[in-house]
Amino acid sequence: MPYFTRVFTASDDTPPINDMRVLVGQYAATITVEGDEDDWDIAALRYDDEEEPVDIERYLPATDGLFEEDINDFRSTISAYGSEAAEKVLSVLDECRQIICFRVPDEADDTVWAPLNAAVDALTHSVGGLIHAEKEGFYDGPELILPLE
């Protein structure tokens, strides 16, 4: 089963691909975009020519339902936590204008993590937001603020 990392941001700005390219380039990785780089919806992080790329997709409100589905799923899970950190995450979900989702293939080897983290760091630096790492929880930058069971 694939591994997902998401960035939930209140920014309406399209995340700049070149910011991510600069950081992932340190790991000999590249990012390619389908269509217009200034208003992209689908991209791929290629970290090894022999491996399937990490798919990157922007979920926007009222496009294909994925945005609303993710927001509702996370809201229902987090509302049960009742902590200050959970309230912060719920606030971010309420203000969210886009979700950038990274799908790491099942077969990915360990060399994927450094360029993936670099891409996520570049993204949060340019558009802000909270990071959700599957099977871990929500991060505000490098700090895990809400571990999820």
Image (spheres, rainbow, N blue to C red):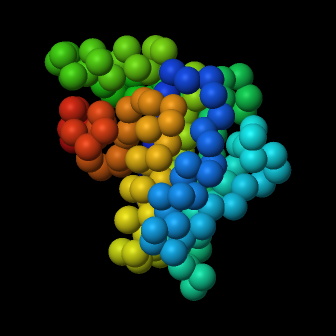
Picture residue at 54% right of the left edge, 79% below the top = 48
Front-lying residue, 48 or 107: 48
Front-lying residue, 92 or 13: 13
Front-lying residue, 125 or 49: 125
Give the total number of marks visible in the rendering.
0
Q: Is residue 68 visible?
A: no
**Residue 33 location, quadrant:** bottom right
Above-or-below relation of 108 to 134: below
Q: Where is the C terminus found, in terms of image quarters?
A: top left
Seen from this angle, which residue lies furthest left? Answer: 83
Above-or-below relation of 41 to 66: below
Question: x, y (%) of residue 140?
Answer: 30, 34
**Residue 82 location, quadrant:** top left
Side (left or right) of 15 relative to 133? right
Picture residue at 17% right of the left edge, 18% below the top = 83
Picture residue at 82% right of the left edge, 50% below the top = 35
Picture residue at 62% right of the left edge, 23% below the top = 12
Question: x, y (%) of residue 144?
Answer: 22, 39
Above-or-below relation of 49 to 80: below
Q: Is residue 59 visible?
A: yes
Question: x, y (%) of residue 129?
Answer: 42, 30
Side (left or right) of 98 relative to 2? right
**Residue 138 location, quadrant:** top left
Seen from this angle, which residue lies furthest bottom? Answer: 50
Question: x, y (%) of residue 26?
Answer: 46, 68
